[in-house]
Image: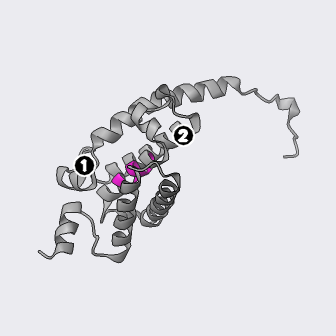
Amino acid sequence: LPVAAQEADELACAVDRPEWKEYHAAFETAARATATEDSDERALAITGLAQQLLERTSNVTDVLSCNVGVVAGYYLLTRLVSPLAVESLGLAGGAEEGQAGLAYRLLQLALVFIFTLRNANRIPDGPGRAWGVTEQAIIPAIMQMRRGQDTKLREDLRQKVPIAPSFRDPEL
């Protein structure tokens, strides 16, 4: 097999198409950025990968040509945006509240695309290895973060003051 075809097979992704090749390049740049403390490099990687994810996921049918790559992209984006939230599985480890919430929502998006794999929420071993992602990295993290997010939501609801019906404008 030619190198491009072999890579496409390993990744289970249509990287021979220009849009997915561009996505893979943004993913690789973001993967390298996880190893750096340079905030500018990380910010550029976050922006590049987020933009690619937005473009690639705008057509859900097209996602099927690289769904493991999309799952890996959301997981990597989560790790870039809030590494502490991912490592600590949410608020318990001291991640900022907003960052933990963002990490939780990004992991939920990864989970949505795991569902597109249609194989009992499992990422196939070969493509998972090639993209550096497993469902064991995502699903337990979401479950643990959910506890923290549910607690925060309950606290927020307790602090909200209900508006009396007499305060409302009947004309609205």
Give, as a single range, the part of the protein colored magenta: 72-78
- The residue lying toward the viewer, choosing from 121 and 39, is 39
Q: Position of residue 155 (x, y in %)?
A: 62, 24
For the stretch drawn in magenta, what is the main secondary structure?
Answer: helix
Residue found at x 48% / y 54%: 42
Q: Amino acid at mark 1?
A: Ile
Question: In the drawing, does residue 52 fall left or right of residue 165?
Answer: left
Q: Which mark is residue 99?
A: 2
Q: Confirm whether residue 102 shows in the render.
A: yes
Residue found at x 27% / y 65%: 13
Q: Position of residue 146 (x, y in %)?
A: 46, 32
Q: Compare marks 2 and 1 and give the one earlier in the sequence.
A: 2
Does the residue at mark 2 contact the one at mark 1 (Cβ under 8 Å)? no
Q: Amino acid at mark 2?
A: Gln
Q: Give the number of callouts.
A: 2
Question: In the drawing, does residue 47 fall left or right of residue 111?
Answer: right
Question: In the drawing, does residue 57 fall left or right of residue 65?
Answer: right
Q: CA distance from mark 2 to mark 1?
A: 26 Å
Against 167, residue 124 (above or below) is below
Rendered-image quadrant of the N terminus? bottom left
Label 1 crowd (10 A; few <14 / some 14-19 / many >=20)? many
- The residue lying toward the viewer, choosing from 4 and 44, is 44
Reading the image, the residue beneath label 1 is: 123
Indicate the secondary structure of the residue bearing disc 1. loop
Indicate the secondary structure of the residue bearing disc 2. helix
Question: In the drawing, does residue 128 fall left or right of residue 20?
Answer: left
Against 80, residue 59 (above or below) is below
